[in-house]
Image: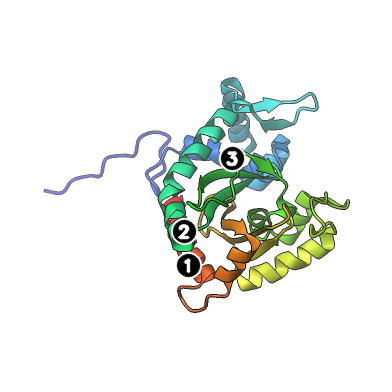
Amino acid sequence: MSSTPASAPAGSDRTTGGVQSVERAFQLLEALADSGGVATLSELSSVSGLPMPTIHRLIRTLVQQGYVRQDTARRYTLGPRLIRLGETSGRLLGSWARPYLAELMEATGETANLAVLEGGEVVYVGQVQSRRSMRMFTEVGRRVQPHCTGVGKALLAQLPEEEARAVLGPQPLQSHTPYTVTDPDQLLAQLAVARERGYVVDDQEQEIGVRCIAVAVPGAPTPTALSVSGPEARIQALEEQTGSAGLVPVMRHIATRLGQVLAP
């Protein structure tokens, strides 16, 4: 006896098995984020490809729930209720990454860090400190400028050049030490080299005597970077190690595995 497949529930997506309206709502939120957090309905329609009536209905619901706001110019912006979700997600990201950060700390003996790019700033979301008496420490949740840190440059290197330039801006960058790169064009040239070799270096650019090596976390849902930081001489000694046990190969191997865990 043959059977007829049951019809899909109203509003569901036969291809993915998901709820179409929910998928589209998140599509609009991501489109808003990609546009810098502000967009008109017509801009959202152009980016998302969704019909205007659908966008209007979904946006109205998101506004009612506080996840989107409408400003005085009738543009739509990401709403304040997303802040709590983002903060909680960031804490969880650090928890998921902790075993990988601990592995990196054990392999190198130095402090391991995890950071993401948010609103043009670097946000540290995870850290496992070195056991050595002289060690680096950065508070989880701390925000820093991207141009003078290893993780920051590793994050910028994951962006298209135009987007990275927009984050940096046209003006000279703030100097923290005599080694800080303050020329945006010079920094963008460094990022191009970093993309080719697969890692970046902060050579006393944030703090005298401190060196940091950072790599991207491939596959993460948002630009994410992993780093080790410590006294300049100790980090340089790690860099001099060659082969598969060398610093950069170990970091990239751990970053790849972490990216597989974080991948959507």
Nearer the observer, 152 or 160: 152
Nearer the observer, 73 or 249: 249
The scheme the figure's colours follow is: rainbow
Q: Which residue is drawn at 76% across and 58% down?
A: 162
Residue underneath mark 1: 250
**Circle 2: is it few (<14), some (14-19), or many (20+) Cα within 10 Å?**
many
The secondary element bearing badge 2 is classed as: helix
Q: Which residue is drawn at 59% across and 38% down?
A: 141
Q: In this view, does 149 lie to the left or right of 85?
A: right
**Dot 1 or dot 2, earlier in sequence:** 2
Residue underneath mark 2: 104
Residue 133 lies, in percent from the top left, at 53, 50
Residue 210 lies, in percent from the top left, at 67, 57
Nearer the observer, 186 or 137: 137
The secondary element bearing badge 1 is classed as: helix
Residue underneath mark 3: 139
| Spatial CA span between label 1 and label 2 | 8 Å
Outermost residue, right direction? 171
Which quadrant of the figure has residue 234?
Answer: bottom right
Residue 28 lies, in percent from the top left, at 60, 39
**Circle 3: is it few (<14), some (14-19), or many (20+) Cα within 10 Å?**
few
Q: Given contact means CB atoms under 8 Å apart, are the residues at marks 1 and 2 in contact? A: yes
Q: In this view, does 129 lie to the left or right of 169?
A: left
Q: Which residue is drawn at 58% across and 26% down?
A: 81
Number of marks in the rendered image: 3
Three-letter code, disc 1: Val
Three-letter code, disc 2: Leu
